[in-house]
Image: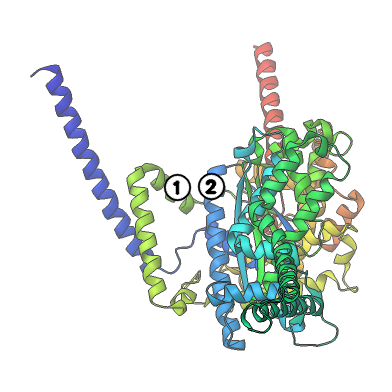
Amino acid sequence: MSPTDEEITRLHHSEENHDARRICSREFDHIAHEECHNRNDILTEDDIYCCSLSKTLCHTSTPVTVGFYSPCGARAHSLLDQIAGCMHKESMRREENEFRKTHQRPRQPEGWNYFTLLWYLVFYEPVITEVHLRRKNIEFIFVRFSAWQYAGSDKLWAGLVTTLCDHIRHHFGPLPLSFYQVVGKAPRYASGFSQDEWRVKKKVCYGAGGLGVILLAGAALTATAFLVPGIRDGSYLKIFGSILTAVSGSGAIVALAPVIKHLLVSQKKKIESMTSDGKFTSHLGFMSAVKKEIEVLTHFVYYMEIFERRRLRIVFEITSLDMCYPERVVGVLNVINTLLSDTNAPFIFLLVVDPCVIVSCLEEAGTMKGMADNGYLYLNRTVTLPFSIPEISTRCKMRFLHEAFQTREDLMYRIITRNLEQGVRKTKGKEMAALTDMEVSTEVDQHQIDAQAVQYIHEAFHCLHNEYDCLYKYIPNSIVQMRRIVNTIPITLRLMTQQHLLRHNICPRSVAGWVVLANQWPCRLSWILQCLQDKLQCKHELDYSKEPMWNVFTENCKEFFSKHKDIGKLLALDGDPELFEKFLSHDFPFTVEEGEQFLRYTVNLDHSIRCRMGQLRSLDSLEKYCSKKEELAEKD
């Protein structure tokens, strides 16, 4: 057999083996999928984390910036997809509950409702009433922005704004947005307990009515002048009727001209033209003009909330920012702060970054000298809900390994089967979709778990603002830090209530204290956690689990402060050291066992800080080991 024939035969066998592996892989996926349906407790830790975060975001007041801290980009994208799915399920569940209460469905701007929306935009202005504020149904509009796609541009922040404008324009339609930009009005609050959500624009109605009367009068006079035999020969009446018709027609054209202009020139094109003009970008009112365009969008979203009879939230997922130049990163963060300047803006920012990279970018940016010399402090002022992704669990790791083993065709086959199952569920009705909500165990219903979590959350919040409790004394005066603590407590409690062993043994006051500890003294807490982790790895002592964490800190205090030059910027994150001593030694004397238990559900502690502590301690251990080796060598 020739070498060519051998090569053809080898390729033929390899193709057969590949097809066989593909068939086996599909059969394995089918079997695994059947097993998943037969079990109710298949949720991984990532699923539980995403579910808890999504439910917290449904209750958190906007605007909010979630620091989605993850060193692994690929896993972060899969978590974002899971969060979007959980939020969609939660919105469907709320919609069904709202329908059972009010017997009203949300009013989608489709079909006849589309023309109704245009009519309301011209002749009505919305009013925020008590009825609207009590609505619980909510819709999330997801906008994913990959900063890497605009990394080559000097105006990366402009890409973020134009992406927002373009997405809202496509979601609601260009015509309603153009009408709103010309004649729309932002909602205003009702005076008293009025139930009427719409008020007539009297000036617009008078103007439109007058224009219509003039048009009809002109048309009538013109028709009379041309059709009535006795007046047909007169020219004055024809001229007068033509003038009235022309005036009314030109008035209608003048009124529609701005709408046509906004249809042709979108906000995206307008902002792009402003940023490309070097003279305008250097003008003092440049950012003010951009902010006005953003305010128009936010007011339009408020308008659509009342029209659709539900709340709307714009979820902005910002990814790949840690792959851009420092100056680009600063520009994006500045735009986020601009969007957050409106206290009632319906924005939820998911900032998916590696905190170590972002901090170094902020510190190296030339425009931030004097403002962000410590990148950690600047990031803390921007992020109102820190969410550190935990270490990957064994089940998640095995799932990712299985997906890595599969071929591209296998993954596409799984997507097709998943879409098919979703279509089958939709045909069975929306009640079926509501019943497919996440369940952690077969013993306790998810609704009971949520109810228990809400009870714990209320108890924890009561401890925060109870003047007879000492916890409020450790809350900082910064409003941003207050929001960080208030936003983090519900996630932590929801995570803990998902565990069957912890569900009935949770102390809300201790959880609230732990969240405050991680928020106020992240550097010292990370050091304690690293020290106890190193000690537990070296030797397992039965009595060590009952050791107070304050004793762990005092035992390693000398080593900690010997590294103040290496961790100076991290140490600046901590609050008053005297309050720390009083907190951990007297008011909240957490033990090593409690610290290990809480660490698994701690989302407001940057894991990169603890990794830095581990690196410093490992370098010291290596240095001591080398010095001992040298001493032994000298003795020999």
Q: Residue 275's x, y, as percent?
A: 74, 40
Q: Nearer the viewer, residue 437 or 123?
A: 123
Q: Nearer the viewer, residue 250 or 259?
A: 250
The residue that appears at 69% across and 28% down in the rendered structure is: 619
Q: How many marks?
A: 2
Residue 429: quadrant of the picture:
bottom left
Q: Nearer the viewer, residue 98 or 626?
A: 98
Residue 72: quadrant of the picture:
top right
Q: Residues within 10 Å of mark 2 (few under 14, many from 20)?
A: some
Where's the C terminus, which quadrant? top right
Q: Is residue 60 left or right of residue 570?
A: left
Q: Residue 100's x, y, as percent?
A: 57, 87
Q: Is residue 40 above or below residue 539?
A: below
Q: Is residue 553 left or right of residue 5?
A: right
Q: Is residue 363 above or below residue 145?
A: above
Q: Which residue is mark 1?
A: 400
Q: Is residue 8 above or below residue 172?
A: above
The residue that appears at 67% across and 58% down in the rendered structure is: 598
Q: Which residue is mark 2?
A: 75
